[in-house]
C-alpha cells in the first residue's frame, strides 16, 4: 500500500484510539492546572516530509508565533511528540500555576518542558495501554522516552522543522489542540512517526478492527 494512504476504516479506528489517548492527556493537564481543558477532534494526516512545515503552519496558524518542545519516543512505536504552544501561552500557564512576577527565560523554558512532558507522557501512555488490551504484541509493548527539549521560542510554525534534515520520506501526523476557557492559552500536541511507524500503526488498527 502506498505510504500516503490509510483506508477509511483504518483512519476512523486510529482517530478513536487517538481520541482516548488525547483525552487522558487533557485530563492530566486539567489536574496540573486545576482548570477544565477543552480538546479538539484529533486530526490525522500522512504527509510527505517536504510538506511538514506547511502542514504544521496550517494546523496552528501560518502567521502565529509559537514556542515548541519535543520529546522522542521509541520501543513498540517510534517517533517524535511535539507540543506547540501559542503565544502568550507561557504567561497564561504561569498565572494558572500561581507564579508571580517575571519568570525569566530559564523559568519559562522549564515551565513549557514540564507541561510538554505531562501531555506527551499521558497521551502515549494511554495509547500504549489500549494497544496492550487488544493486540498480540509478541512481547512487552513498552515505550521509552528522551528528556523533553525546547525546539524554538516565538517563531512561526513553519520554522519549527527543517524538512531537509529529516531522513524520512513520509510521516504520520496526529494533532489535537487543548484550550482553556476564558484564558489566552492553546497547546497543540502533535505526534510524528516515520514510514515504519505508519506500517506498525496500520497493523495495530487492523487488529483493533478485528477485535470489535
Image (cartoon, rainbow, N blue to C red):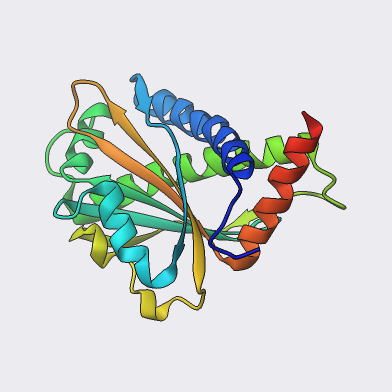
Q: Residue at x 37, y 80 (%)?
A: 164
Q: Residue at x 54, y 37 (%)?
A: 15
The answer to whether residue 185 is above or below residue 142 is above
Q: Is residue 34 in sight in this rendering? A: no
The answer to whether residue 199 is above or below residue 180 is below
Q: 202 left or right of 118?
A: right
Location of residue 167 in the rendering, given as x and y in whole percent from the top left corner: 50, 78
Q: Is residue 163 in sight in this rendering? A: yes
Name the foreground residue: 103 vs 159: 159
**Number of marks in picture:** 0
Location of residue 201 in the rendering, given as x and y in whole percent from the top left corner: 65, 52
- Quadrant occupied by the C terminus: top right
Location of residue 71 in the rendering, given as x and y in whole percent from the top left corner: 47, 57
Q: Residue at x 37, y 64 (%)?
A: 52
The answer to whether residue 93 is above or below residue 56 is above
- Which corner quadrant of the image does residue 126 belong to? top right
- Which corner quadrant of the image does residue 14 belong to? top right
Q: 90 left or right of 84?
A: left
Q: Residue at x 26, y 56 (%)?
A: 57
Q: 156 left or right of 11?
A: left
- Quadrant occupied by the N terminus: bottom right
Location of residue 7 in the rendering, given as x and y in whole percent from the top left corner: 61, 48
Name the foreground residue: 183 vs 190: 190
Amino acid at each position: 500500500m502506498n505510504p500516503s494512504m490509510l483506508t477509511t476504516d483504518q483512519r476512523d479506528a486510529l482517530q478513536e484510539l487517538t481520541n482516548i489517548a488525547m483525552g487522558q492527556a487533557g485530563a492530566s493537564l486539567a489536574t496540573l492546572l486545576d482548570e477544565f481543558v477543552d480538546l479538539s477532534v484529533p486530526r490525522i494526516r500522512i504527509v510527505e516530509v517536504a510538506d511538514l512545515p506547511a502542514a504544521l503552519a496550517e494546523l496552528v496558524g501560518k502567521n502565529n508565533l509559537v514556542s515548541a518542545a519535543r520529546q522522542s519516543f521509541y520501543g513498540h512505536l517510534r517517533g517524535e511528540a511535539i507540543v506547540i504552544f501559542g503565544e502568550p501561552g507561557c504567561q497564561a500557564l504561569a498565572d494558572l500555576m500561581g507564579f508571580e512576577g517575571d519568570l525569566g527565560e530559564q523559568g519559562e523554558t522549564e515551565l513549557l518542558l514540564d507541561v510538554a512532558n505531562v501531555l506527551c507522557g499521558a497521551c502515549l501512555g494511554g495509547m500504549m495501554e489500549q494497544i496492550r488490551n487488544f493486540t498480540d504484541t509478541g512481547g512487552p509493548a513498552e515505550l521509552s522516552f528522551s528528556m523533553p527539549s525546547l525546539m524554538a521560542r516565538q517563531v512561526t510554525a513553519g520554522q519549527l522543522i527543517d524538512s531537509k534534515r529529516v531522513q524520512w520520506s513520509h510521516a504520520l501526523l496526529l494533532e489535537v489542540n487543548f484550550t482553556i476557557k476564558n484564558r489566552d492559552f492553546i497547546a497543540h500536541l502533535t505526534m510524528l512517526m516515520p514510514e515504519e511507524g505508519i506500517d506498525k500503526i496500520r497493523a495495530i488498527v487492523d487488529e483493533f478492527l478485528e477485535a470489535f
